[in-house]
């Protein structure tokens, strides 16, 4: 009788241990899945950080390139202005001419009264 109770108790404990083993395996699988998810998230975060750094570096490079283009355009503009100034200085604008020679592009005054006809 006592041995029957002991055998039943041992069987109950054994089934409880089997259930505990099964539940601990399930818990371990869930913990491993959580660890895997955390690891993947950390890896993704690292990739995003690297990508963000690359993007930031690319933006810095583009900004520097735009600054160089802006400086070059400013230099060309200054050179063009100097060229215009030199041309205006060297080839005085039509209103500043003092001699009586006809000039292309200027309307010539024609006086009929002083014009003698030769036939």
Image (cartoon, grey):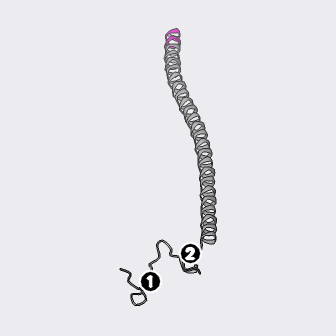
User: Spatial distance from mark 1 to mark 2, Cα to Cα?
Assistant: 19 Å
Q: Residue at the far bottom: name it.
A: 113
Q: Between residues 54 and 42, which one lies in front from this camera angle?
A: 54
- Front: mark 1 or 2: 1
Q: Position of residue 13 (x, y in %)?
A: 53, 18
The residue where tag 1 is placed is 109
Q: Position of residue 115 (x, y in %)?
A: 41, 85
Tag 1 secondary structure: loop
Say if 70 sits above or below 56 in the image: below
Q: Position of residue 36 (x, y in %)?
A: 55, 29
Tell whether position 5 is magenta: yes
* Region of the chain picked out in magenta, as a range: 2-7
Please state, as top left, top right, bottom left or bottom right, where the C terminus lies in the image: bottom left
Tell whether position 68 is magenta: no
Q: Main secondary structure of the magenta part?
A: helix
Residue at 52% x, 24% y: name it.
29
Residue at 39% x, 87% y: name it.
112
Q: Quadrant of residue 45?
A: top right
């Amino acid at each position: 009788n006592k041995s029957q109770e002991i055998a039943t108790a041992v069987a109950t404990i054994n089934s409880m241990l089997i259930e505990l083993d099964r539940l601990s395996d399930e818990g371990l699988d869930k913990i491993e899945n959580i660890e895997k998810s955390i690891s993947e998230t950390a890896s993704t975060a690292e990739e995003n950080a690297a990508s963000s750094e690359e993007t930031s570096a690319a933006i810095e490079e583009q900004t520097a390139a735009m600054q160089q283009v802006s400086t070059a355009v400013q230099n060309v503009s200054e050179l063009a202005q100097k060229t215009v100034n030199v041309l205006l200085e060297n080839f005085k604008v039509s209103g500043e001419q003092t001699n009586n020679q006809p000039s292309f592009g200027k309307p010539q005054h024609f006086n009929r009264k002083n014009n003698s006809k030769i036939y």
